[in-house]
Image: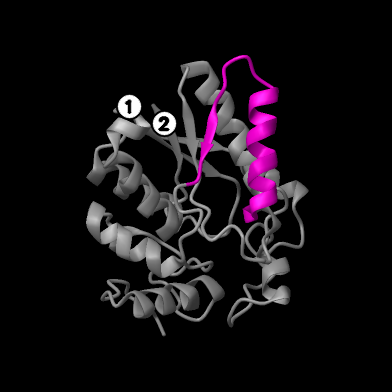
Amino acid sequence: MTIVLLSGGLDSTALLAYIKARPKIYGKDVRALSFHYGVRQDRELTAAKKITALLKVPHSVFNLSDLTALLPGCSLTDSSVPVPPGADSKLTGRINCVPNRNMILISIATAWAVSLKFKMVAFGAWDTKRRTIYPDRRKGFIRSAEQTMQLGNYHKVKLAIPFDTFSKADIIRESMKNDAPLGLSWSCYDNKKQQCGKCFPCIDRKKAFKIAGVTDPTAYLE
C-alpha cells in the first residue's frame, strides 16, 4: 500500500509505473498524489491526469496554490521571474528551486498515508548522493525526512526512494521494462503548447534519452 508523489514529470511518471509493477513489494493498493502549488506551468498536472488514467491508478490533487504569495523570487511560483535558459548551474538552480518544496509535499503525503494506514510514500528522487544544487533531493535530507515521518506519527510510514542510485538515463532504461508512458510526461518549466527544449529540465531530459539510447518521444519547440 503506497502513495506515490506524482508531479507529472518524467521521474515521477517512471516511479509510478515502477511501483505499480511490483505489488509484492509496494502493495496492490497504489495511489497517486499531485499538488497544485501555484507553479506557472499547469502542464504537469494535465500530464499527471493522463498518466494515472492510462495506468488506472487513483489520482488525487491537493490545492496549495496559496503558497505562491509566500514564495517570491522563484521562477516556478513568481510570474515576474523569467525561467532561465541553459543547463543546470548554481544560478539556474537557485532561481528554479521552490523553497522547502519536497518537505511540504512529503509531509502531506505522509499524513494521508498515516490516515489510510499505508506503509509507504514513494518519492522520485534519483542519484541522491550527488552534490545536486537542490538540497531537498540529497541523501541527508531524505534520511532526515524519513526519520521525522516516523518520529511524528504512531503509524510508521517508510519513505521509498527506489531510484536512489539511478541516473536519469537509468530511470529511462528502467521505464522501458515497466511500460511507463514517458511520452505523456511534462518536464518543461515553461507553459507553452510544447516543451520548450531550452530550459534546464528540457536539456536534462534530451541528454538522458540520448545517453540511455532510447528514442525521445517528446515534441520540443527547439
Q: Residue at x 69, y 44 (%)?
A: 67
Relative to residue 90, is residue 5 drawn left or right? Answer: left
Expressed as whole percent of the image width and height from the top left, the position of residue 77 reads: 65, 57
Please tell me whether residue 158 belongs to the stretch shown in magenta: yes
Please tell me whether residue 14 belongs to the stretch shown in magenta: no
User: Which mark, residue 89?
Assistant: none
Q: What SS does tag 1 mark?
A: loop
Say whether disc 1 or disc 2 marks the residue closer to the N-terminus: 2
**What whole-number distance in Å separates the C-alpha atoms at marks 1 and 2?**
7 Å
The answer to whether 28 is drawn above or below residue 47 in the figure is above
Q: In this view of the protein, which residue sits in the foreground, 202 or 25?
A: 25
Q: In this view of the protein, which residue sits in the foreground, 128 or 208?
A: 128
- Which residue, given by chain and number where applicable, does mark 2 sit on? 2
Q: In this view of the protein, which residue sits in the foreground, 193 or 200?
A: 200
Instruction: Say whether residue 49 is visible.
Output: no
Neighbour tally class for label 2: few under 14, some 14-19, many 20 plus, Cα within 10 Å: many
Where residue 220 sits, quadrant-wise, is bottom left
Q: Are marks 1 and 2 in contact (CB under 8 Å)?
A: yes
The answer to whether 10 is drawn above or below residue 48 in the figure is below
Expressed as whole percent of the image width and height from the top left, the position of residue 24 reads: 29, 31
User: Which mark, residue 29?
Assistant: 1
The answer to whether 189 is drawn above or below residue 210 in the figure is above
Q: Quadrant of the C terminus?
A: bottom left
The answer to whether 138 is drawn above or below residue 153 in the figure is below
Q: Which residues are magenta?
A: 137-161
